[in-house]
Image (cartoon, rainbow, N blue to C red):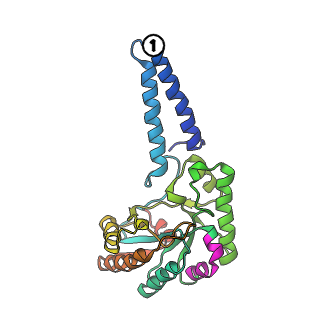
């Protein structure tokens, strides 16, 4: 785990200086014995930058701090999650399917969208699902300062609490991007950061069968599945394919013997 509480941008700025200094030393033929130390310093700076960046954008690692993308469990369970809503009519259609199939899910809602469609948030809770925090404006938090990160989370939790009576306990940063500062802000609020282990790229609308198959190919016990009932705050792209694929995914996983739980429930089963 990386313990220095610096933002990724600050780290990359420092490493950029290191690379430039290394290249300058090499160009001026300084530090060339016993090896071209300036050049190697620049190379190491570039490698370090790649490492820090990849660990900030790829799910499934805890380099910057505690996150959850799946759980190790002997139980044959999965958590179905939806991002970027609420977004009518698609969120309602997803809820219809979940009700018909008797399946719980977790919806990571965008605060601005929740304000526009509080009835859908209330329905999510009323039908036994979990609501998570997906920030207010769906910002890339790696590009935000600490105050903005805190405001994005706090503002969304105020919206959720006003609608449901309580704030969200789990949060998913937009795109899953996080660094040490992002995780520290979430930890200060006692919120668990939830990523995913199964990604279908459904937001690109590649086709119903493709979405379903990409998901089903990667599922195993303890998986957290990411789908999208919304389209950020732009709300311009349809989600019909995700809706149709959701039914296929649920029915096939049921046939394979899987049970569905919320994020809170799956986190409690980790062995």
Q: Residue at x 37, y 76 (%)?
A: 245
Quarter holding residue 111 = bottom right
Residue 214, image x, y percentages: 32, 66
Q: Residue at x 53, y 49 (%)?
A: 65
User: Considering only vertical position in the picture, is 189 above or below 265?
Assistant: above
Evaluate whether residue 77 shows in this view: yes
Residues 109 and 193: in front is 109
Evaluate whether residue 223 shows in this view: no
Residue 164, image x, y percentages: 65, 77
The residues colored magenta run 113-125
Q: Is residue 122 magenta?
A: yes
User: Considering only vertical position in the picture, is 180 above or below 73?
Assistant: above
Crowding at mark 1 (Cα within 10 Å: few <14, some 14-19, many 20+): some
User: Considering only vertical position in the picture, is 108 above or below 11?
Assistant: below
Q: Residue at x 47, y 78 (%)?
A: 104
Q: Determine whether, in the image, residue 114 is placed left or right of residue 81.
A: right
Location of mark 1 (residue): 29
């Amino acid at each position: 785990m990386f313990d220095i509480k610096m933002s990724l941008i600050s780290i990359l700025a420092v490493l950029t200086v290191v690379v430039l200094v290394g290249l300058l030393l090499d160009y001026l033929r300084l530090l060339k014995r016993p090896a071209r130390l300036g050049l190697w310093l620049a190379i190491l700076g570039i490698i370090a930058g790649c490492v820090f960046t990849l660990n900030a954008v790829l799910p499934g690692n805890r380099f910057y701090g505690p996150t959850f993308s799946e759980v190790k469990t002997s139980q044959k369970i999965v958590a179905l999650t939806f991002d970027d809503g609420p977004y009518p009519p698609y969120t309602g259609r997803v809820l219809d399917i979940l009700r018909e199939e008797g399946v719980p899910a977790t919806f990571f809602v965008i605060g601005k969208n929740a304000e526009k469609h509080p009835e859908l948030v209330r329905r999510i809770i009323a039908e036994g699902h979990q609501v998570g925090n997906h920030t207010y404006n769906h910002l890339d938090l790696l590009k935000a300062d600490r105050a903005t990160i805190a405001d994005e989370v706090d503002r969304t939790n105020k919206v959720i609490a006003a609608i449901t009576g309580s704030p969200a306990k789990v949060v998913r940063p937009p795109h899953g991007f996080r660094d040490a500062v992002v995780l520290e802000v979430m930890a200060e609020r006692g919120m668990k950061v939830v990523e995913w282990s199964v990604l279908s790229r459904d937001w690109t609308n590649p086709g119903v069968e493709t979405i379903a198959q990409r998901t089903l190919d990667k599922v195993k016990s303890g998986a957290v599945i990411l789908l999208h009932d919304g389209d950020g705050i732009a709300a311009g792209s349809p989600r019909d394919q995700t809706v149709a694929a959701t039914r296929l995914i649920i029915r096939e996983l049921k046939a394979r013997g899987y049970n569905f739980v919320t994020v809170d429930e799956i986190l409690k089963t980790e062995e």
